Image: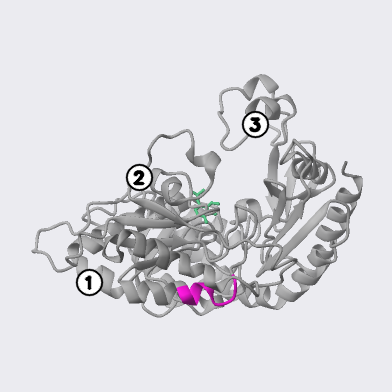
């Protein structure tokens, strides 16, 4: 069969597509049938420059032979093995490798299959840890407005996106939200962390005081909010959160699903900002997005607190059929090898200023009201069409797709996060295409 054979439109109904306007999409589907390095191939045979690394995940670029070969080899050797009461070497090897690149003190890894599962796992670890260490009064979880922590119940409870929450009833109880840190008036067109707003971390103190700090188990934040529009933190903000957590026995959880694995030019955003959380939530770039896998890293004290029980006790009643599955672990190891052998984190670090200057050159183009860059992440915010929010950015997405560029939009913000293998010439191409798109937009 021709791998590029056109898909019959009557085949499109069965798949209820996630986060998609299904009816609209199925009238004029955009189908991807191949990928290599920085490009996708569309069903009509066009090349798309991938400015988003898929969904912020394909950090080493597409169809990298080392990763695909590792998956194929593993699939032929040990296709599946449980991690309940038995194991296989690659999961242990991958956990040890992760610990070796993680910030000091994050020494144990719990495997999941996605960012959402990693978030809910982290929240469960936090609550259970407070109990096992005799602080069972700490049942509250604190998130933040404009936080995105996946779509499972824990994640949407601590998350701060109204549309993702409003259809699903009461969600988790005992959750409160800090204010978001986005302040374009005080921090217009930022490159890197913003100058103003560190004091917003004191919102945690306000909430802790309101509820009594001894009722609070953990606070979760994305070091850089991605899916809600690329919101870099104010300088000093994460440090201040760390201090407040330390003062009040609150666990600090970083959701590094987007910022992990070199996206910031460092292994994790924790390294970029010099703040180490107690629990770090990761996924996406762990396996280059190729096989679903997530990993939650925890501090020694947390793991150790669970290990104090009797001989036959299962310390933590949680886990997934595919936790640390052999194929995912093989993909993870080959991905970490690729990052290291090709120096991709260092490459991203070197490109950060190039990326920032290129994107900021769009200042002054039609409809642009803000531009934010940090690491190899960028957001270009557009003036919404009056009475029709999100429409202008979506029109930009469609135009870019037709003209050889893959971008993402969230609200009226164009979000980008190219694979770390992106060249300076390709950064130029991304910006030139986007400039042309902006000039055509209504
Ligand atoms: N946390 C963050 C910060 C994310 O950006 C995402 C996905 N974009 C998730 C969690 C959820 O990950 P997944 O879609 O793999 O469940």
**To which residue does mark 3 refer?**
21
Is residue 245 something that shows in the picture? yes
Above or below 246: residue 87: above
Is residue 114 visible to the viewer in this orientation of the structure?
A: no
Front residue of 82 and 162: 162
Tag 2–tag 3 contact (CB < 8 Å): no
CA separation, marks 1 and 2? 27 Å
Instruction: Indicate the secondary structure of the residue bearing disc 1.
Output: helix
Q: Which span is picked out in magenta?
A: 234-240
Is residue 385 shown left or right of residue 284?
A: right
Q: Does the magenta-highlighted stretch encompass residue 425? A: no
In this rendering, the label closer to the viewer, 2 or 3? 2
Name the one closer to the observer, 170 or 33: 170
Task: Decide which of tag 2 and tag 3 comes sooner along the chain.
Answer: 3
The residue pinned by badge 1 equals 304
Q: Residue at x 63, y 55 (%)?
A: 63
Q: Are the residues at dot 1 and dot 2 in contact (C-beta closer than 8 Å)?
A: no
Residue for point 47% across, 53% down: 115
* Count of residue discs: 3
Between 403 and 436, the one lying in front of the other is 436
Q: Check disc 1: other Cα within 10 Å, few if <14, some if 14-19, many if 20+.
A: few
Q: Residue furthest top?
A: 10
Q: Read off the residue under disc 2.
A: 172
Q: In the rendering, at what x and y percent does residue 151 appear?
A: 47, 44
Q: Residues within 10 Å of mark 3 (few under 14, many from 20)?
A: few
Here the colouring is: one colour
| Residue 398 higher or lower than 274, as above or below | above
Mark 2 to mark 3 CA distance (whole Å): 28 Å
Q: Is residue 235 magenta?
A: yes
Q: Residue at x 87, y 58 (%)?
A: 432
């Amino acid at each position: 069969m021709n791998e590029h054979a056109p898909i019959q439109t009557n085949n499109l109904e069965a798949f209820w597509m996630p986060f998609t306007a299904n009816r609209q999409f199925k009238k004029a589907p955009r189908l991807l049938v191949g990928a290599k390095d920085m490009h996708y191939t569309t069903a009509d045979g066009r090349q798309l420059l991938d400015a988003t690394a898929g969904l912020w995940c394909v950090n080493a670029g597409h169809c990298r032979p080392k990763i695909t070969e590792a998956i194929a080899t593993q699939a032929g050797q040990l296709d599946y093995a449980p991690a309940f009461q038995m194991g296989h070497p690659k999961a242990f090897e991958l956990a040890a490798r992760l610990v070796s690149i993680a910030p000091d003190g994050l020494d144990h890894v719990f495997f999941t299959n996605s960012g959402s599962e990693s978030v809910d796992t982290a929240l469960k670890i936090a609550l259970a840890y407070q109990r096992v260490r005799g602080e069972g009064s700490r049942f509250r979880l604190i998130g933040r407005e404009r936080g995105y922590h996946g779509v499972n119940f824990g994640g949407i409870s601590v998350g701060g996106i109204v549309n993702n929450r409003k259809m699903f009833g009461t969600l988790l109880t005992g959750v409160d939200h800090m204010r978001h840190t986005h302040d374009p008036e005080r921090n217009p067109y930022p490159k890197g962390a913003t100058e103003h707003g560190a004091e917003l971390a004191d919102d945690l103190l306000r909430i802790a005081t309101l509820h009594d700090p001894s009722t609070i188990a953990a606070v979760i934040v994305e070091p850089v909010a991605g899916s809600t529009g690329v919101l870099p933190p104010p300088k000093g903000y994460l440090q201040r959160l760390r201090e407040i957590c330390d003062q009040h026995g609150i666990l600090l959880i970083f959701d590094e699903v987007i910022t992990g694995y070199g996206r910031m030019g460092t292994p994790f955003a924790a390294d970029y900002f010099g703040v180490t959380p107690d629990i770090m939530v990761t996924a996406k770039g762990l396996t280059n997005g190729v096989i679903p896998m997530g990993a939650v890293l925890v501090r020694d004290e947390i793991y150790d607190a669970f290990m104090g029980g009797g001989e036959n006790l299962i310390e933590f009643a949680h886990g997934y059929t595919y936790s640390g599955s052999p194929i995912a672990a093989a993909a993870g190891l080959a991905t970490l090898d690729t990052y290291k052998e090709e120096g991709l984190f260092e490459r991203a670090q070197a490109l950060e200023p190039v990326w920032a200057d290129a994107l900021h050159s769009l200042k002054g183009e039609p409809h642009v009201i803000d531009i934010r860059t940090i690491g190899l992440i960028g957001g270009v915010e557009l003036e919404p069409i009056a009475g029709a929010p999100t429409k202008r950015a979506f029109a930009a997405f469609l135009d870019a797709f037709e003209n050889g560029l893959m971008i993402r939009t969230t609200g009226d913000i164009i979000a980008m996060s190219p694979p770390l293998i992106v060249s300076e010439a390709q950064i130029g191409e991304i910006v030139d295409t986007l400039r042309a798109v902006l000039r055509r937009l209504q």
